[in-house]
Image (cartoon, rainbow, N blue to C red):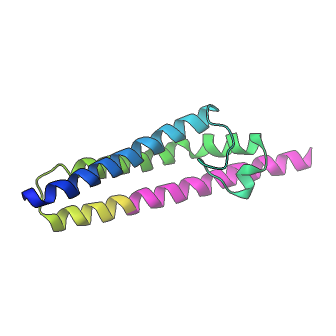
Amino acid sequence: MVDNDLPVRIVLLVVMVGSGVLLIWMARATASGRLKRNSIAGIRIPSTMASDEAWQAAHVRAKRVTMFAGYASVATGLFALLPVPAPVLGAAVIVGSAAMLVLVLYGARVGSRAATEISNESTVD
């Protein structure tokens, strides 16, 4: 590791670990009901915002995959501490960020399906 890389590595560490911890917290808080339907954090699409029940169902179903997205982000941030060459670090950040993005989007899809199921059930009743 070159001394010039240290500030970049510290920023990567803080941003990626911070993002991961926030994702993990949000996944737990929304699934448990501590983080209610809102316009800032969570899966905020029409199907999940339709009702409190749809919001809750979506986040319960998406919890696990969203937490994996957080773990991917934390692991990517911690990788910045390893004494690897800059190109290897760059590749790791790209792969880790892509994994986090794919997992978050997949979690939103899973959550959307759960919210839609709840909405369909309530219109049948």
- Which part of the image, by quadrant, shows the N terminus? bottom left
In the picture as drawn, the residue positioned furthest to the left comes out as 2
| Rendered view: 107 above or below 22 | below
Residue 14 colored in magenta in the image? no
- Please state the horizontal and vertical placement of residue 98, each as a whole percent of the image: 39, 63
Q: Residue at x 62, y 51 (%)?
A: 43
| Rendered view: 49 above or below 27 | below
Q: Is residue 112 left or right of 98 when viewed as pictured?
A: right
Q: Residue at x 53, y 59 (%)?
A: 105
- Which part of the image, by quadrant, shows the C terminus? top right
Image quadrant in which you'd find residue 113: bottom right
Closer-to-camera residue (102/39): 39
Q: How many marks?
A: 0
Closer-to-camera residue (120/11): 11
Magenta span main SS: helix
Q: Does residue 106 appear in the picture of this structure?
A: yes
Q: Which residues are magenta?
A: 98-125
Closer-to-camera residue (61/25): 25
Residue 113 colored in magenta in the image? yes
Q: Residue at x 42, y 46 (%)?
A: 70
